[in-house]
Image: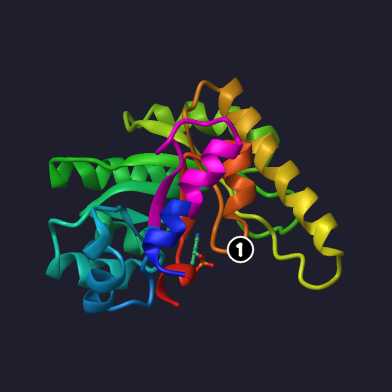
């Protein structure tokens, strides 16, 4: 699929879900893609935020193209926070110290990115804030003075263990639950959905879908 096809698909999915056109925005995930490929496959079709998942790669690309809109969607390590200077939105805050470190660096930068909190997906142990810690983490992160705009979640990889329909219903449930939690907390942005599951994410109310592979095939 090309980017215009993905965007047309998003518009159709929004309509099916009774949502306004453009309410589910594309974040073009560009990790592993060089600048020329990003220009050809993404920016030739319009302005889109670009999602990078590795801090050094982000630093190197953004140094070459400081005027592009960079998002950071990957995990955050303390010694890599300094590379986030060009970023306008950080999608995956998992613990309060990450926001504190960004706030501290932002003092030096003279500008700060907005944040999303990554919710644990209930299946894999590795990433995300457990549901019962979400409200406290939100409060603590807000004390840094940075703006929290919403939640992010990643569907688990169920592999081939489940029937397709069961996998889809579990992912839809996760996305719907995440949307409900964001709504309860008064948070407007929902970063959900990747190449394989963005239709479910749009149905559940995603405002930012992070699509990579599908744009570059
Ligand atoms: C790579 C990545 C994506 C995009 O995945 P695709 O399958 O290439 O669409 C989305 N979100 C995160 C956090 C990623 O690391």
With 61 as the anchor, is 57 left or right in this view?
right
Q: Nearer the viewer, residue 127 or 64?
A: 64
Residue 26 located within the stretch drawn in magenta = yes
Position of residue 57 relative to residue 27, above or below, is below
Residue at coordinates 32% horizontally, 28% vertically from top-left? 145
Vertical position of residue 201 compared to residue 150: above or below: below
Task: Please give the residue where the numbered disc 1 appears in the rendered image.
Answer: 196
Judged left or right of residue 149, residue 129 is right
Q: Residue at x 76, y 65 (%)?
A: 158
Instruction: Specify whether residue 95 is in view.
Output: no
* Residue drawn at x 37%, y 77% as measured from the top left: 32
Q: Quadrant of residue 203?
A: top right
The C terminus, quarter of image = bottom left
Specify whether residue 99 is in view. yes
Residue 160 is inside the magenta segment:
no
Residue 36 spot, x, y in % from top left: 21, 78
Q: Is mark 1 within 8 Å of ligand 1?
A: yes
Element at badge 1? loop
> Which is more toward the observer, 91 or 128?
91
Which residues, given as a range, are shown in magenta? Answer: 9-27
| Quadrant in the picture for residue 29 | bottom left
**Picture quadrant of residue 161:** bottom right
Crowding near the residue tagged with mark 1, few <14, some 14–19, many ≥20 C-alpha atoms within 10 Å: few
């Amino acid at each position: 699929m090309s980017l215009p096809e993905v965007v047309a698909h998003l518009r159709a999915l929004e309509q099916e879900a009774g949502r306004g056109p453009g309410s589910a925005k594309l974040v073009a995930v560009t990790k592993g893609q060089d600048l020329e490929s990003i220009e050809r496959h993404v920016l030739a079709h319009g302005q889109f935020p670009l999602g990078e998942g590795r801090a050094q790669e982000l630093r190197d690309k953004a140094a070459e193209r400081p005027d592009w809109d960079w998002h950071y969607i990957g995990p955050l390590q303390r010694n890599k926070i300094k590379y986030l200077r060009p970023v306008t939105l950080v999608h995956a805050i998992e613990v309060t110290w990450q926001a504190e470190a960004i706030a501290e660096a932002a003092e030096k930068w003279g500008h700060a990115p907005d944040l999303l909190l990554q919710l644990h997906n209930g299946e894999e142990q590795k990433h995300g804030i457990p549901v019962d810690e979400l409200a406290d983490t939100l409060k603590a992160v807000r004390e840094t003075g940075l703006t929290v705009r919403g939640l992010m979640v990643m569907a688990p990889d169920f592999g081939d263990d489940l029937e397709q329909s069961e996998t889809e219903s579990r992912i839809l449930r996760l996305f719907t639950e995440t949307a409900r939690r964001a709504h309860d907390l008064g948070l407007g942005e929902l970063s959900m959905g990747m190449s394989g599951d963005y239709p479910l994410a749009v149905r559940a109310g995603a405002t930012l879908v992070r699509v990579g592979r599908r744009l570059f095939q």
